[in-house]
Amino acid sequence: MEALANMSKEQAYQFTAGASQAMMNKQFRIAHLTSNKGQLLNGKICRVSSFISQYRTNPDMRLGCTIRQEDGTESNTPISFKACNLVSVEGNIMQNLMSASEPLSDEKIIQGLKQGLQQHEGGGERGDLNHRINLYKNALKDLEVATNSKRSGNSNGNALEDDQYCLPCGASPAPDDNENTFDWAMRTNKPACVGNNKLDLRLMDLGLKGDGVATCDICTLTLDTSETRLVTLPCVHQFHTSCIEEWLQSDLGRRNWNCPTCRHIVPNNLTTYMIRYKAELRNRFQEFLLSGFCHKCILWIMERKRNEEIPALDESGEQMTMNQVGQMQEKVYAFPPSK
């Protein structure tokens, strides 16, 4: 991060262009366009066909895309889009995930905001972090005033109106002549939101517990809204912990070692995909300040890689994973059959 801040924008462009180049020849769903013409393109499938990796001629890192027609063919003339308007086709699973989740209470939201602000007190020279810290401070102030006066703003029993709980996904200050290189890189390289471009503070625990509607595909029972022991696999399918453990130890499970719903391979270390509600909810409030990702993007971009090793060791000298950062893990492993 420090090295990026010390680069010129042109140097940072070459340093970060690899993310855009990796999108070449892949399919995406167009999303979040706001103009009248753009809204007609939202939802259409496209393929990235070109990318000009030169700062002077393509400062916004736009990607040339060909649109898939109704007959399956591609348009002849490419249209350029920013990366923040191209959602992975695979990310469609997030559109209806936990759609009926119970909203967090104002008390839990206040606690999460305070913990996040305490963890990241003073954003330093990061304009984007300072911007999101101010959003948190304003939300916290409004919530404390409303809850102290004991007025209810919506049908869920929360004290504020619905839109007062929503912050923009990827929230960052408007670009200006004094924008530093790091802030520019964060804004230009922002991935597309897999949700509706909003962080709803009331839904910050999305996917950390059941929604009372979805069912565990193994036992077919409803994943209720209590903080029961659940597992969310990298494919974002959710099960009762006991059910997925029993499945993987069955003859069928041991032969295939995959998700019972979609057949994606299950990681060897199932422990890091077991949800720890309080710790992970706290981490989410902190993560928005750092990256600006909404609750759905945090789940889709960050938490799906819970099992990915990072170059750091814990106190016992063991390799750490992304999910172990800032919290201690109980060592419970489920291993696939030996080859």
Image (spheres, rainbow, N blue to C red):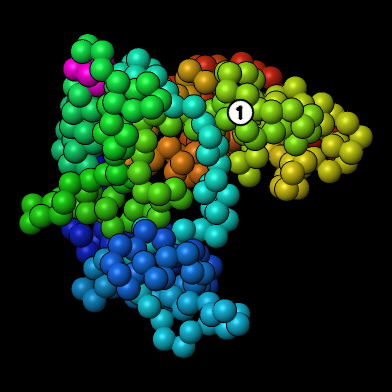
The answer to whether residue 94 of the structure is visible from this angle is: yes
- Residue in the image at 51% along x and 31% along y: 101
Q: Main secondary structure of the magenta part?
A: helix
Instruction: Assign a secondary structure to mark 1.
Output: loop
Front position in the image: 140 or 314: 140
Between 191 and 230, the residue placed more toward the observer is 230
The C terminus lies in which quarter of the figure?
top right
Camera sees residue 120:
no
Q: Position of residue 201 (x, y in %)?
A: 36, 31
Query: How crowded is the residue under tag 1: few (<14 C-alpha within 10 Å), some, or many (20+)?
Result: some
Give me the residue at 25% from left, 17% from top. 151
- Disc 1 residue type? Gly
Q: Is residue 4 left or right of residue 196?
A: left
Q: Nearer the viewer, residue 291 or 285?
A: 285
Q: Quadrant of residue 306?
A: top right
37 vs 238: above or below = below
253 sits to left or right of 45: right
From the image, tell me which residue sits under label 1.
Answer: 212
Question: Which image quadrant for residue 132?
Answer: top left
Name the residue: 54% across, 53% down.
91
The verdict on residue 63 being magenta is no
Q: Position of residue 16 (x, y in %)?
A: 34, 58
Q: Residue at x 23, y 45 (%)?
A: 172
The residue furthest bottom is 76
Q: Decide: is 176 above or below 40.
A: above
> Residue 147: where, in percent of width, then height?
26, 15
Give residue 119's position: percent from left, percent from top: 29, 21
Q: Residues in magenta?
A: 143-147
Q: Where the N terminus falls, by quadrant?
A: top left
Is residue 145 highlighted in magenta? yes
